[in-house]
Image (cartoon, rainbow, N blue to C red):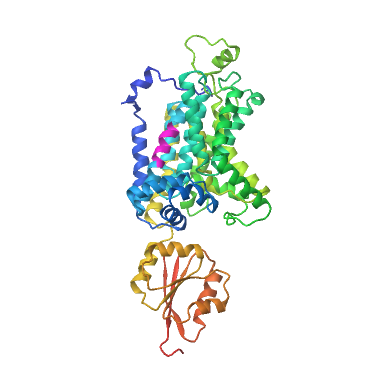
Amino acid sequence: MSPSLPIETGGEGNRDRSLAGVPVELYPIVLIAAALRLFRLESESYWVDEVVSVTIVTSNTPSELLVSVPGNDPHPPLYYLILSGWTALFGTSELTARLLSALVGVATVVVLYGVGRRLFDREVGAIAAVLVAVSPFHVWYSQEVRMYNLLALLTAISFYWFVRIQAERSTDESGVRDDIGYVVSTVLLGYTHVFGLFAILAQNAYVFSRPLVRTVPRSRLTLRRWIALEGITALLLLPWLARLLRRTVAASGGAAGNVSWIPLPTAETVRETFAAYLGGYLFEESYPLLVSLVVAGCLVLALSSGRHAWTGVDRDTARETERGTTTEGGPENPPVNAVYLVVLWFIVPILVPIVLSHVVTPIFVDRYSIGASLAFFLLTAVGVRTLSRPSLRFVVVGVLLVGLAAPLPTYYQDDQKEQWRAAAADVESSVDEGDVVLVSRPFTERTFGYYFDAADVPTVRIPPDASTNEIRAAVDGHDDVWIVLSYTDSSTNQRIVDAVESRDDYRGPVEVNRYNSIVVVRLERTSDGG
């Protein structure tokens, strides 16, 4: 089988396999993606970061979200602006707020199909789309009130338009439309998450490395046109880029920032990232072994197919295009080195942030690289497509789908997030006026307080480094003490409990309840103070 993978040009065969203009294979893929993302969408309470999202949009006006919030939050404002409008219409319940992410996740599957089809063929597009549809990694973030799925969607849309502008003349009406589509989607990507900038960097790496690796020697995307498009994009992103530059300079100077919780990435971090793409969060072992071996084989096959400079069209047509003598009936579009482009899409948003983490400050988190995970699944689909026998391709896809779907029952059956709703409800049902609630982290106080509705009972922050005297002083004049422990180590937890228990007027713990990474301890005040 030839390693070259043809670009679809919308021929007769494609029309025969479409229904109302939509490829028939896309219908079941979308249904699977939607079902997995909507199932038990509201079953778990918000966790800390989700409460941050909800409280930010409910406590700030749109103008504040655009101007003030980016000064305190590490993320750009686009997602918060969208979420603000969404919650204004549909409310802030777990179901309605997460529904936005679920719909974005389904849209990501559809757009990835389009990118795979345009770069390679319908089969690659369909395989990549169905892998992402069942991916526990993507299902997880499709059920979370955060910006990560929007980052994935806009990354896919930006690359879709990037591929299109390789083929259209800037003077054509369609070329101007493609230019606008690329700039708009890429600007939105930059305003969604800082890792969107690394996707843009990957696109630039493709364009500026063309002379070195002889890809697309006669692309209709001229260097002058590309620089103009990137100049417009940079100009529109300038307000955010200026703020980001100030933060970077401050971080390189040793200033504390709001990403100080991120550890320095290592080789183990990279391994865990790839494991996360394959559902590693939900396996007892850190790496899903069987599916990882199959994926590794597919990646090797994909990279082997990319050893030839010309992918996206057959090599004879590529040579003719290079000479300017394309034969009649050949592809209308100039060739694109699809495998090389997708490899850059995959590697740059992972490698560059890891390097910056060592040079400036740690910034790499696996979920931030969700845009790169789309390229990961595209390359896997390309590897499957290189197999010559259709029956073998079906078997490999089946193994991948079973391997990816295997942890999903665990995901749905077991609590994955801290159960703040249950913890707050149980405390609220038993707490009395005169009691006090101690919370072990300042940021968890906001999360607990989101669900805790007992205005006559104070909630007091206890920093992890609080002294014994400070902890004891926090309970002065109160009856029973409820201690909510989360995001602290066991020694810190024990020290907080011991500080209260060592007082003569308290005894316990008389009650200890656990709610998936949350421990609630109750100590009882003695009636005689001894």
Which residue is at the front of the view, 269 or 227?
227
* Magenta-drawn stretch, dominant element (helix, strand or loop): helix
Q: Is residue 157 visible?
A: yes
Identify the image quadrant of residue 309. top right
Q: Is residue 270 magenta?
A: no
Residue 437, compared with residue 142, is above or below; it is: below
Which residue is at the front of the view, 497 or 35?
497
Magenta stretch, residue numbers: 104-113
Residue 106, compared with residue 212, is above or below; it is: below
Which residue is at the front of the view, 39 or 333?
333
Residue 356, compared with residue 93, is above or below; it is: above
**Residue placed furthest toward the front:** 63
Q: Is residue 391 found left or right of 365 in the rendered image?
A: left
Q: Is residue 120 visible?
A: no
At horizontal 34% and vertical 43% (from top left) the residue drawn is 35
Q: Is residue 187 found left or right of 94 in the rendered image?
A: right
| Residue 524 in picture, x, y percent from top left | 42, 81
**Residue placed furthest toward the left:** 20
| Residue 428 in picture, x, y percent from top left | 36, 70
Identify the image quadrant of residue 397. top left
| Residue 334 in picture, x, y percent from top left | 53, 18
At horizontal 50% and vertical 24% (from top left) the residue drawn is 5
Total labels: the figure holds 0
| Residue 129 in picture, x, y percent from top left | 43, 35
